Amino acid sequence: MADITAPAQRFAAVPPIHIQAPTILVFDSGLGGLSVFREVARVRPDAHFIYAADDAAFPYGALSDAALVARVREVVGTLIAATRPDLVVIACNTASTLALPALRAAYGLPFVGTVPAVKPACAASVTRQVSVLATPGTVRRDYTAGLVREFAGACAVTLVPSERLASLAEAAMHGAAVPDADIAAEIAPCFVTTPQGRTDTVVLACTHYPLLLDRLRAVAPWPVSFIDPAPAIARRVASLIGPTAFASSPKPVRLVSTAQPLDAAMISRVLERQSLPPEVIAPPLARAS
Ligand code: DGL
């Protein structure tokens, strides 16, 4: 069929092409953002990447709303000044569902957030029983309630706060032995049986959880679809900064934390990318409350 779009409109729909490789800052409270980074790096393998973990304040799920907004605003501001990114990915649901408006107002850069994938989960569920597994912070947000109101449709949505799963994922990434029973206990409330059917879809609404995906599948009481939003976030990044213009080999990732230096060898393995020597950038006023 002929394309009847006016030439000017077609041109406007094409994302900008950066002749120079863009600089992308991926930010989380800890290691969870690596699950997002992997996918973003697939769509822009040529980019200069900074991975930043605010591990001095981990876990974000335990902070009050006011403390979290102040903290994220300050740490991200310090990181922007230090690394001059073209785009920032807030690879953390707990921060994105609360602090994105403050970040966008404070810094004139494109921000891509990570929020619970309620819409695709409810569209895909056959039994219409969907669970959203998240930190206590993300579960209690108005933003999350709004997503459920707007996108649940005919689905019953169970919000499941997990106190420990992000910390268990951190421990597992650092090589600690995390018992199956501990993981099983955190996800158990996601598995709901009703006369209409049982849960068939679980939204992983904390970026740490996809790092444990194999173990979640292994301990699940029955098979479900676990929804990881990372591929959709990567598509959003590509729509904002365009696709890779020229092939180039992956550059070493710059690793930044606010407490101890990140474990560069472990992160290089996860990302299949070399890293620069890890740095600690701790803003003097950004203390966890
Ligand atoms: N990775 C973060 C998220 O997506 C949360 C972990 C934390 O509590 O700091 O919500």
Image: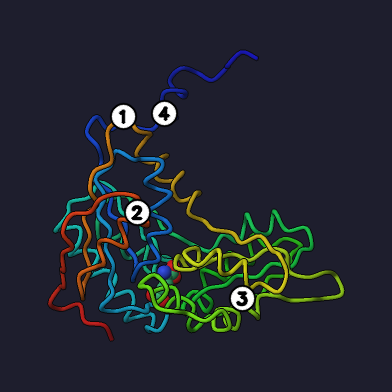
- Look at the numbered disc 3 and give the secondary structure of its residue: strand
Residue that numbered label 1 is attached to: 247
Alpha carbons under labels 3 and 4: distance apart: 38 Å
Whether 241 is drawn above or below 226: the answer is: above
Q: Which residue is mark 4?
A: 14
- Residue carrying label 3: 159
Kind of element beneath mark 4? loop
Q: Crowding at label 4, few (<14), some or many (≥20) Cα neighbours within 10 Å?
A: few
Q: Work out which quarter of the rendered image holds the C terminus and state it.
A: bottom left
Residue at image location 49% in from the left, 84% down from the top: 163
- Badge 2 vs badge 3, beta-carbon distance below 8 Å: no
Classify mark 2: helix, strand or loop: strand
Q: Quadrant of ligand 1?
A: bottom left
Amino acid type at circle 2 is: Phe
User: Residue 8's spot in the image, x, y percent?
Assistant: 43, 20
Q: Viewed as shown, does residue 138 lie left or right of 156? A: left
Q: Is residue 172 visible?
A: yes
Q: Residue at x 41, y 28 (%)?
A: 12
Indicate the amino acid at tag 4.
Answer: Val
Q: CA distance from mark 4 to mark 2?
A: 19 Å
Q: Is residue 144 left or right of residue 175?
A: right
Which residue is disc 2 drawn over?
111
Disc 3 to disc 4: CB gap under 8 Å: no
The Cα–Cα distance between marks 3 and 1, rounded to whole angstroms, is: 43 Å
Tell me where residue 218 appears, x and y as whole percent: 62, 69
Which element carries disc 1, helix, strand or loop? loop
* Marks 1 & 2, CB-CB < 8 Å contact: no
